[in-house]
């Protein structure tokens, strides 16, 4: 794992928000050649509160759960919902995303371990802040695996998987590829096999460039070596697994698989919740439509289970 440099919290902006005694700050975690920027909501200025580090999913997803192709504010709503229940949170833009800046950042040099190290830095920083009684980690989708590994051996007291997979990334991709034409599968599976074995693939069909372009292959190799079911076993803290029944990206069976692997986990399958933590029908077009609806609230049962888990001693 690459070395990171940890600094004190840098408060750029502080404003009051309408959740009891909450305040919202823009903060930075200094790393080598740059910084990671996040939004810190302190739920109560009068006494210490638990704080949750919220990790976004894959791709160019920012601290609010949005990316250039979709704005749904799912993670922003989660942070606000936690604040309403007296729970602080830190959500942030990943390296190279949003307002996080790393000088000379090149996709070719990015590794899964970089994301893990960033979460470790946030945990250490927040644990040293006496405004917070304890630090917890919550990862969404790919962020669940990142958070799971970062929590291992850290001072984080609990871990929460939100729509996280139970299978390794290449196995999930193989399952998804079954819905593609046979010609696609015949070309994709050998590429997956090579990357899983740590070998780069020089030539990739043009229509697979978004998945397997040469510049992203080193990152995929670093990601593919982790198996969520093997990693969750390493956790020595309570684990909460939350999964929706209308998630068209991660199946309920993935959450069940993760739950079976972890003896200290608690699993809640939430009826009618999709991948972005909102109420949605299973029909694909209607489900996808929620991905670009920033006003649709997150599922209430999801927030309820999360708050209960965080507050339970």
Image (tube, helix red, strand yellow):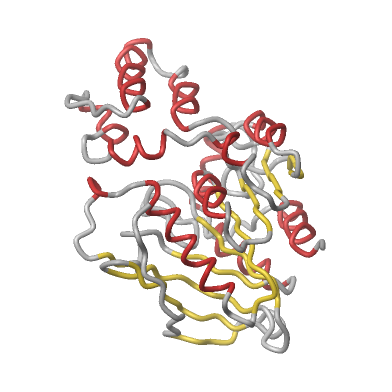
Q: Residue at x 55, y 80 (%)?
A: 24
Residue 134 is situated, as x and y percent measured from the top left of the image, at 67, 70
Q: Residue at x 25, y 32 (%)?
A: 209
10 in relation to 53, above or below: below
26 in relation to 55, above or below: below
The quadrant the C terminus occupies is: bottom right
Residue 127 is situated, as x and y percent measured from the top left of the image, at 59, 72
Residue 291 is situated, as x and y percent measured from the top left of the image, at 51, 48
Q: Residue 67 occupies which quadrant of the picture?
A: bottom left
Looking at the picture, tell me which residue is in the foreground, 234 or 253: 234
Extreme-front residue of the structure: 153
* Residue 208 left/right relative to 307: left
* Residue 31 left/right relative to 41: left
Residue 177 is situated, as x and y percent measured from the top left of the image, at 43, 21
Q: Residue at x 67, y 78 (%)?
A: 43
79 in relation to 116, above or below: below
Looking at the picture, tell me which residue is in the foreground, 238 or 143: 238
Looking at the picture, tell me which residue is in the foreground, 213 or 145: 145
């Amino acid at each position: 794992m690459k070395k990171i440099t940890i600094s004190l919290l840098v408060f750029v902006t502080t404003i009051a928000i309408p959740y009891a005694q909450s305040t919202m700050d823009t903060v930075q975690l200094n790393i080598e050649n740059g910084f990671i920027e996040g939004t810190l909501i302190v739920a109560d200025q009068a006494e210490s509160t638990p704080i949750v580090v919220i990790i976004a999913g894959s791709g160019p997803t920012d601290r609010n759960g949005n990316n250039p192709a979709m704005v749904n504010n799912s993670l922003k709503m989660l942070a606000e919902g936690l604040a309403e229940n007296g729970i602080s949170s830190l959500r942030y833009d990943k390296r190279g995303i949003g307002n996080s800046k790393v000088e000379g950042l090149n996709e070719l040099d990015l590794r899964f371990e970089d994301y893990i190290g960033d979460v470790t830095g946030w945990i250490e920083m927040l644990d040293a802040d006496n405004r917070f009684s304890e630090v917890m980690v919550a990862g969404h989708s790919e962020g669940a695996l990142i958070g799971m590994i970062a929590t291992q051996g850290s001072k984080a007291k609990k871990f929460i998987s939100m729509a996280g997979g139970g299978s390794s990334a290449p196995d999930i991709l193989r399952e998804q590829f079954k819905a593609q034409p046979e010609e696609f599968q015949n070309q994709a599976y050998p590429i997956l096999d090579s990357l899983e074995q740590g070998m780069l693939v020089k030539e990739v069909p043009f229509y697979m460039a978004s998945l397997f372009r040469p510049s992203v292959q080193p990152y995929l190799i670093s990601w593919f070596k982790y198996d969520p079911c093997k990693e969750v076993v390493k956790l020595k803290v309570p684990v909460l697994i939350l999964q929706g029944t209308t998630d068209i990206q991660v199946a309920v069976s993935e959450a069940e698989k993760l739950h079976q692997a972890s003896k200290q986990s608690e699993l809640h399958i939430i009826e009618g919740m999709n991948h972005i933590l909102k109420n949605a029908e299973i029909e694909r077009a209607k489900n996808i439509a929620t991905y670009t609806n920033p006003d649709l609230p997150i599922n209430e049962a999801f927030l309820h289970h999360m708050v209960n888990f965080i507050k339970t001693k």
